[in-house]
Structure formats: structure tokens, C-alpha cells
Image (spheres, helix red, strand yellow):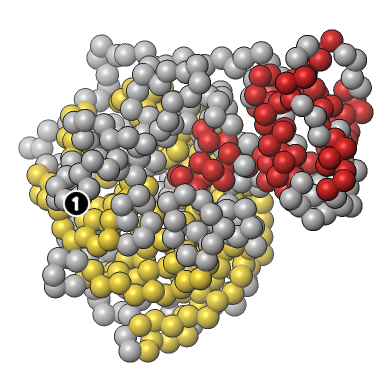
């Protein structure tokens, strides 16, 4: 949101604010019915003394909300938050056109949730500082001023995505590089490494880029990049989203071609030959917002004037899609993809390719709450058994604006034959990304996680909260958490790779902020100095 939008962040900020409300916007009622159930929230006061039929209300809420998805559990947020939450639901619900469901009384729905919700939700305990940590990291802070932001040095960074491209793994690259996407300023920039010396490469300014993917669509042997462009920083239902194709130019920049446009907010683009014609096709995640959102397959039909041409096909019409990584999951020779869908859906699904570019959908995971807060997935063979597993995170703080204990990094382990087993690897408030790597060189996978809270929360100080942690796998399935940074919970992206080629894995994070922090550290490299080259 690879990294997400966030790849979506601000979009998710508002889209998730309405995440629960969206469930009701889908089920609608007539105006007269809404006016009859409208109440003054301030009058609820001590209504907890009034008798209510919990069993009846549970049934009504399950029927009403559950027509589209799982109703939110009362324990999702504290008691004090439910009045405004339900009120927002019903206000959006009023705008819907459906009238085929029985509508509960809003006051009773509020009281149901207030009765069953906890008074407060305990904050998770931060990781204790370590006197002798198992790994020592040295941080290098990289400012993008003035190299990248010469005209707006005071603007806070909104870096949605960093991706590392290793030349040893991609023959279309002459050298390894990191590509960053700032969805606020619109800048896409290269960061290059010579051991621990960093330099900037090419850059280009777009609208609201949030994710990159390496490609060679024209088969000229030169690496290009596909960029998911949201089309707006703030969430809207519009047709400004785009799929952009960046080709290196001679002026330390990129030439820009539009491959797909007039869609909602695009968050991810992945490649593969889905119909077996030996041409590169695209899977496009259109996150959208409330009324827009799809997964598209763009099938390449040829090249005209050096530009690939595509036909489009809608694969999924739900909004809220964050990531669509591709892989031959079932090893039948056909490229599949996995989709994580947020908003009220909160699900991870596998799209199995039949071989002709059509797909069979299989559920991998579905949350029991529309405010679960999915933030992304990353494919990896976590247990080294030869198949693809899924690292998944749920920590969208903009779902409810509360710190909750169920924000975590999860492993969906591929057990074969279409079976998946889920387990929690570790918790982190506001977790936005998790990536795997053997940080301590002991032969198994560890996990690095970052958090995005980004703005003050009422009654909560982020100063002591962990911002970056790594989970050390000490034995199979057992992890010990270690904190790298506290307080700076402004990261929507994290990368793990051996940037300085010294034999151990380093970490890179970037800032996504409401206000710039000084001294600036738009990108931070955490050098792993556990291996001393001979």
C-alpha cells in the first residue's frame, strides 16, 4: 500500500472513518422512516437505567447490518464512542435508496452498543527498552529538502510507498535502487546506494502517486515503472485515478504515459500473463471511496507507437481494494492474484486463474467486524516449504480513532489444497505494514512492522507507543518483539533488504505526517551492523 496506500492513507483515513457507516449506506431507507427514528443524542444521558431487550435488538441488528457484512462487535470501541458512531451510520444510511429491510430504532441501537461496550479499552504495554538488544541498528536520516522538494520545503512529507528493486533479481535494471512515492507532493523519486552513501536519481512530479511496480511492457530490456495514481490526496468519488507508465529519460527524469484513466482512486498495479498469450497484462486495484471501486484486468492487445494497448475487464466490483499481488499460488502454471479488501468488507481473497484470464474466487480470511482495519498484505514463503504465504496487517487507526488491542501482524499460512491457517505474530497499535526477512541470520524469518497514527488521538499520547518493531523468531512460530523507535508513529511503509551489500538485512521507513518534524527525516535507513565483512 508491497506497500499500500496506504498506498491509500488519507483515502483510508476518511474512507475508514465511514467504514462502519458504509455498511448502513448500502441498506438504505425511505426519508419518512429516518425522520421517525431521529433522536437527540444529548438526551440519552442516563438511559442505561432503562430496560431494553438485548436479545431482540441483537437479532434486529444482525438482520439489518448483516445483510451486507458482519455487524460491528460492541467491544470494538469504548462506550462513549457509540452514540456518535451510530448517529453517523444512520445519517449516511438516510442517503441510501433501499427500503426492503426492517429498520431498527436508532436510539435502541445506540443503547444496545453502549450497554455491551466496555467503559474503556486498555492501551497495549509498550516494549521495554533493552540493555543488550540482539541486533544493533544505526539510523541515517535522509531529508528530501532541497533535492526533491526545492519549491515547498515546509510541506510535510506524505510518502505512501518505498519499494526496493534489486538489480541482481531484475535483469532489466542496471543498478539497484529504491523508488519512493509521495502522495501529497506528487513526487516519485529514486534513491540509490553506494555502500552507506545515498544519492538521489531520477524524479518526476505526478498527481497523487501511491505505489510503484517494476515492468518491461515494451520488452526493450530497460526497466520501467507502473505507478498507481490516486487522483486526489483526500478521498473522493471521482474519475481521476490513473495507471501511469514511467520510462527513463535522458534528463534525469521519466517520460510519462497514461495507460488507464477515468477510474476511481488507484492503489496498486501488478503484472502477469493471465491469458497465456505471452504478453504482460495488468491487475489494477481501484480503491475508490464510497461509490467507486473495482478490480480490473487490463489485457494487453498490442503496442501502437511504442505504447502498450489494453482492453479492460472488471474482476471485482467492491470498493476498498488495497493490494493485488500476483503469483501462481496453486502451481498449475497460471498466474493468480490475492486481494485484500478493506472498508466494510475486511477480507483476504484468492483469485485462481482458470487459464483463460477468468478467475475462481476463494476466501482466505474474513474478519468478524467491519471496523477490523485491514491495511495490507505481503506475499512471502514464510516457512520455507516452497509455497506462498501471506503477511497481513490490520491497524487502520482511522477506522474508529481508538487504540485497540487487536491491531496486529498476522500470518496466513498456505497449507496446500486450498487450506490456509491463520495466526497472530505480534501486536502493534496502528500497524500499517509488515514485511519478512532474516534479520539475525539464523535461518528463519523475522518480521519488521511499522505504525501509522499520524495525528493526535483524544486522551492518548503517542510518545511512548512503539513506532517500528521487529519480531524475532526464536523458534518455529514463537516471536520476541523488539522496539526500534517510539513516538514517531508516522510510517505507512517499511522495506527490508541488504542496501549496503554487507551480508545482513537493513530497514528503510518513510514519513507520512500532518506537519513536518524538524530536523527532517523524510526517509530513514536503519543499518544492520550485525555482520562485519571480512
Question: Which residue is at a point 63% across and 63% down the rendered structure image?
Answer: 316
Snapshot quadrant of residue 354 = bottom right
Q: Is residue 504 visible?
A: no
Q: Nearer the viewer, residue 335 or 252?
A: 252
Q: Is residue 396 visible?
A: yes
Q: Is residue 529 left or right of residue 275?
A: left
Residue sticking out furthest to the bottom: 305
Q: What residue would you read off at disc 1?
A: 151
Question: Which residue is at a point 21% across and 60% down the rendered structure image?
Answer: 203
Q: Is residue 94 above or below residue 298?
A: above
In the picture, the quarter occupied by the C terminus is top left
Count of picture labels: 1
Q: Is residue 265 above or below residue 532?
A: below
Mark 1, residues whose alpha carbon is within 10 Å: few (<14), some, or many (≥20)? Answer: few
Question: Which residue is at a point 57% across and 41% down the rendered structure image?
Answer: 16
Q: Is residue 344 left or right of residue 515?
A: right
Q: Nearer the viewer, residue 284 or 128?
A: 284
In percent of width and height, residue 247 lies at 26, 72
Q: Is residue 349 left or right of residue 534?
A: right
Snapshot quadrant of residue 465 = top left
Q: Is residue 375 left or right of residue 210?
A: right
In percent of width and height, residue 57 lies at 87, 29
Give the structural element (helix, strand or loop) at label 1: loop
Q: Is residue 316 above or below residue 114?
A: below
In percent of width and height, residue 82 lies at 69, 26
Question: Which residue is at a point 42% across and 68% down the rendered structure image?
Answer: 243
In percent of width and height, residue 441 lies at 28, 35
Amino acid at each position: 500500500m508491497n506497500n499500500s496506500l496506504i498506498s491509500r492513507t488519507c483515502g483510508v483515513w476518511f474512507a475508514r472513518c465511514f467504514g462502519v457507516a458504509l455498511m448502513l449506506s448500502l441498506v438504505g431507507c425511505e426519508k419518512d422512516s429516518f425522520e421517525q427514528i431521529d433522536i437527540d443524542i444529548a438526551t440519552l444521558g442516563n438511559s442505561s437505567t432503562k430496560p431494553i431487550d438485548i436479545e431482540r435488538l441483537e437479532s434486529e441488528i444482525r438482520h439489518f447490518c448483516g445483510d451486507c457484512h458482519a455487524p460491528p462487535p460492541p467491544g470494538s470501541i469504548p462506550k462513549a464512542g457509540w452514540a456518535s458512531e451510530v448517529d453517523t451510520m444512520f445519517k449516511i444510511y438516510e442517503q441510501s435508496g433501499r427500503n426492503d429491510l426492517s429498520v431498527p430504532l436508532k436510539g435502541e441501537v445506540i443503547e444496545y452498543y453502549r450497554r455491551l461496550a466496555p467503559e474503556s479499552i486498555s492501551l497495549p504495554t509498550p516494549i521495554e527498552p533493552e540493555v543488550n538488544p540482539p541486533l544493533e541498528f544505526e539510523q541515517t536520516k535522509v531529508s528530501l529538502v532541497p533535492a526533491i522538494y526545492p519549491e515547498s520545503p515546509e510541506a510535510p512529507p506524505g510518502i505512501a510507498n518505498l519499494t526496493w528493486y534489486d538489480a541482481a533479481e531484475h535483469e532489466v535494471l542496471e543498478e539497484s535502487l529504491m523508488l519512493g512515492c509521495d502522495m501529497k507532493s506528487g513526487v516519485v523519486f529514486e534513491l540509490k546506494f553506494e555502500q552507506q552513501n545515498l544519492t538521489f536519481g531520477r524524479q518526476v512530479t505526478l498527481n497523487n502517486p501511491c505505489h510503484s511496480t517494476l515492468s518491461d511492457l515494451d520488452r526493450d530490456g530497460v526497466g520501467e515503472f507502473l505507478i498507481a495514481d490516486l487522483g486526489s490526496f483526500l478521498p473522493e468519488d471521482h474519475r481521476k485515478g490513473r495507471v501511469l507508465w514511467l520510462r527513463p529519460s535522458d534528463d534525469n527524469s521519466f517520460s510519462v504515459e497514461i495507460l488507464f484513466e477515468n477510474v476511481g482512486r488507484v492503489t496498486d498495479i501488478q503484472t502477469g500473463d493471465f491469458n497465456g498469450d505471452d504478453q504482460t497484462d495488468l491487475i489494477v486495484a481501484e480503491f475508490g471511496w464510497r461509490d467507486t471501486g473495482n478490480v480490473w484486468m487490463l489485457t494487453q492487445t498490442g503496442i501502437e507507437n511504442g505504447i502498450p494497448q489494453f482492453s479492460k475487464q472488471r474482476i471485482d466490483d467492491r470498493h476498498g481494494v488495497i493490494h493485488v499481488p500476483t503469483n501462481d499460488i496453486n502451481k498449475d502454471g497460471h498466474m493468480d492474484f490475492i486481494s485484500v479488501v478493506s472498508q466494510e468488507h475486511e477480507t483476504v481473497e484468492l483469485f485462481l486463474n482458470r487459464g483463460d484470464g477468468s478467475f475462481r474466487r476463494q476466501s482466505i480470511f474474513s474478519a468478524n467486524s467491519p471496523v477490523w482495519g485491514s491495511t495490507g498484505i505481503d506475499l512471502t514463503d514464510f516457512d520455507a516449504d516452497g509455497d506462498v504465504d501471506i503477511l497481513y496487517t490490520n491497524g487502520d487507526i482511522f477506522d474508529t480513532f481508538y487504540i485497540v488491542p487487536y491491531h496486529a501482524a498476522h500470518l496466513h499460512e498456505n497449507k496446500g489444497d486450498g487450506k490456509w491457517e491463520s495466526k497472530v505474530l505480534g501486536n502493534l497499535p496502528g500497524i500499517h505494514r509488515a514485511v519478512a526477512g532474516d534479520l539475525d541470520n539464523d535461518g528463519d524469518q523475522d518480521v519488521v512492522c511499522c505504525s501509522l497514527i499520524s495525528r493526535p488521538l483524544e486522551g492518548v499520547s503517542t510518545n511512548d507507543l512503539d513506532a517500528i518493531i521487529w519480531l524475532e523468531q526464536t523458534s518455529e512460530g514463537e516471536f520476541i518483539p523488539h522496539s526500534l523507535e517510539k513516538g514517531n508513529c508516522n510510517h505507512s511503509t517499511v522495506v527490508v533488504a541488504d542496501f549496503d551489500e554487507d551480508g545482513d538485512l537493513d530497514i528503510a521507513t518513510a514519513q507520512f505526517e500532518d506537519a513536518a518534524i524538524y530536523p527532517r527525516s523524510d526517509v530513514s535507513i536503519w543499518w544492520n551492523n550485525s555482520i562485519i565483512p571480512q
